Image (cartoon, rainbow, N blue to C red):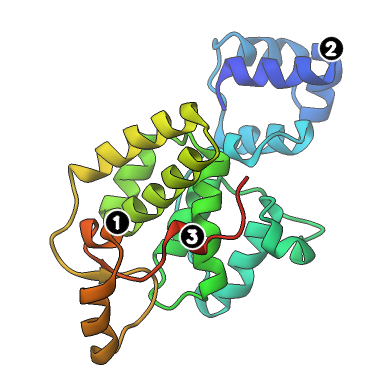
Amino acid sequence: MTCETLRAERLRHGWTQERAASRLEVSQPYLAMLETGKRRLTPKLANRAVAVYQSSPALVPPSDVPAYGDNASQVLAEDMAALGYPGFSYLRPQDWQAKNPAQVLLAALAHDELEPRLVESLPWLVLRYSPFDNRWLVREAKLRDLQNRLGFVVTLARRLAERRGDHEKVRVLEVLEAQLERSRLAREDTLCKRVREPQRRWLVEHRPEEARHWNLLTDWTVDALRYVP
């Protein structure tokens, strides 16, 4: 969240600086300095602003990629529900600590055994919330060797955007694809799923072209995705 976004979110609600400052638990002069860039917006205050203004989770400053542990599938499903994914609408939590969609995306991609229903939700997430902070997203993906998994998911999201004729999203996702392409890994990987040798041999021969390009062993295609934002 930038100083300009902070001001725009306040004006979206039609609030005075005095009213917004009270809700944000800061003084009006301090809020004025935040909105003009004279003071730095801290991550803690940015998160508070997202909650107070009921802003898009994409405005939550990305920080560390969360580690979900043994309960990963349930927590990720709840995160996707909170982010609006139709397939998990019945799981929407009542009290959700907002997370940047890019953090949720990388947390999901970091798993080697992810339920298919969660894998299916990832292109939706990319298409719904792009553009991301590409600099942060690519850096964090490279730190975890996730650039091929991310690149494949971005490619599927771009295919969805092409099908619905969203030329602006196509352009945005092409830029992200190009940035990931520069660090594409030559080693073979899967899309969040352990693969036994017989299945590996089959996928080597029958995987779609997008998966072959990103060196992934998966049979996911854009035709298998049920939800489009």
User: Reading the chain from its start, which is encountered first: label 2 or label 1?
Assistant: 2
User: Reading the chain from its start, which is encountered first: label 3 or label 1?
Assistant: 1
- Residue situated in front as seen by the camera: 172 or 55: 172
Tell me, yes or no, if residue 27 can be seen here.
no
Amino acid at circle 1: Glu
> Left or right of 214: which side holds 17?
right
* Residue to which mark 1 is pinned: 210
Report, in whole angstroms, how far the alpha carbon at label 2 lies from the one at label 3: 48 Å
User: Residue 4 location in percent, x, y?
Assistant: 59, 14
* Residue to which mark 2 is pinned: 16
* Residue to which mark 3 is pinned: 223
The quadrant in which the N terminus is found is top right
Callout 1: SS: helix
Callout 3: SS: helix
User: Residue 104 location in percent, x, y?
Assistant: 52, 55
71 above or below 93? below
User: Reading the chain from its start, which is encountered first: label 2 or label 3?
Assistant: 2
Report, in whole angstroms, how far the alpha carbon at label 3 lies from the one at label 1: 13 Å
Amino acid at circle 3: Asp
- Residue situated in front as seen by the camera: 169 or 207: 207
The quadrant in which the C terminus is found is top right
111 above or below 131? below
Report, in whole angstroms, how far the alpha carbon at label 2 lies from the one at label 1: 50 Å
User: Residue 214 location in percent, x, y?
Assistant: 24, 57
Asked if marks 3 and 1 touch (Cβ < 8 Å), the reply is no
Q: Residues within 10 Å of mark 3 (few under 14, many from 20)?
A: few
Tell me, yes or no, if residue 163 can be seen here.
yes
Q: Identify the residue shown where x is 31% and y is 41%.
A: 177
> Left or right of 10: which side holds 209?
left
Q: Quadrant of residue 181?
A: top left
Q: Identify the residue shown where x is 76% and y is 36%.
A: 54
- Residue situated in front as seen by the camera: 107 or 166: 166
